[in-house]
Amino acid sequence: MARWEPDSRGRLEQAALALYGERGFEATTVAEIAERAGLTERTFFRHFADKREVLFGGAAMLQELLVSGVAGAPDAAAPIEAVLTALEAAGALLQERRAYARQRQMIIAASAELRERELIKLASLASALADALRRRGVSDPAASLTAEAGIAVFRVAFERWTQEGNQKDLPQLIRESLDELRVVTAGL
Amino acid sequence: MARWEPDSRGRLEQAALALYGERGFEATTVAEIAERAGLTERTFFRHFADKREVLFGGAAMLQELLVSGVAGAPDAAAPIEAVLTALEAAGALLQERRAYARQRQMIIAASAELRERELIKLASLASALADALRRRGVSDPAASLTAEAGIAVFRVAFERWTQEGNQKDLPQLIRESLDELRVVTAGL
């Protein structure tokens, strides 16, 4: 009989990350993750569709956060300001989970399959951001370009944030990366 | 005995595109492509690793073109100008194959697998562009941001170019999209 397990999802995530880091993502099985967490495979599959989902389960929440951030920005805000506000809010939340985010990033960097999944996730985010901008009345191509610019800024900021030796927080790196994007696109 | 077939590669491409358009990518087999082209499967596999490669075989050439465009830009050119020059040159070549590019785009849009492959290809292009900029002495994060901006501009311009009713040529749409990106990132 399965007992009720407090925070079994969190324990499974932790166990999975530890194992992916030790053995690599490909070599780790769901059975091993469940065992490390002291739970059953059945419990694993109550929380995650497969072992990849452990790493990408947060994507829907991030998307929701960005879309509602854009929708909730002041009417007077320029599209890029609405996107920046949303990215900073998401960045502030991620900032609280830096150790996790860094560990996750190292695992993803080590696997071609996971890198591809991450790219696809970021493209969905860009597409959701563009839709959110269109709902604010932004027309194309401005909506697509602003969304793409936002995701490019987020990617670059996120990479800098997870680098060894970085001292800056993610919202700050997001603002700096947008400033830098302005400078480079202007050709200065 | 196989005869030597003039432009068998081109005939296979044409046959594949026609079949993907008629039946969808997933439902088409290599045997059918070869038959439509009046060639053997063996000939198909001399030119392409699989049926997906028919659509992505041009990626290496495009990457080569962009990288050499960036490398060959005048020393005094700002990074974004070097990228723009390279994108315009690639755009001018693609312009000559508009009917093909449009047909290819419709096939890709209809398949999740192909859309993912296209994303991955574009990410590789961004990464190759960033490397080419680093070889020009551009440091990070400017190199990554400029490359990402370039690919965002290219994607948006390409999409506009393949749209029904578009009259503008691709190099022009690339320039316009970069101008638009400057405007939206500035928050004007």
Image (cartoon, coloured by chain):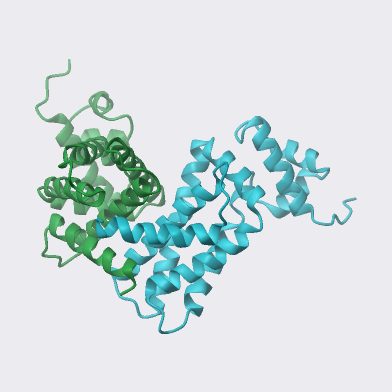
Chain colours: A green, B cyan
What residue do we see at 40% from left, 61% from top?
Answer: B178
> Can you give x and y, in whole percent of width and height, for residue A132 in the image?
28, 38
Identify whether B102 is placed above or below B80.
above
- Residue A110 relative to residue B89: left or right: left
Q: Residue at x 32, y 64 (%)?
A: B145
Image location (x, y in percent) of residue B8: 79, 53
Q: Is residue B49 among the parts visible in the rendering?
A: no
Q: Nearer the viewer, residue B150 or B173?
A: B173
Does residue A54 lie above or below A105 as drawn? Answer: above
Q: Locate residue B119, reporting x and y percent.
A: 45, 49
Q: Identify the image quadrant of residue B47.
A: bottom right
* Res A154 → quadrant: bottom left
For residue B90, what is the image quadrant? bottom right
In the rendered image, the vertical position of residue A119 relative to residue B147, given as above or below: above
Going 45% across and 66% down the picture, which residue do you hit?
A: B128
View extreme (bottom): residue? B75
Residue in front for this viewpoint, B172 or A167: B172
Where is residue A106 drawn, in percent x and y? 27, 55
The one of A72 and A75 positioned closer to us in this rendering? A75
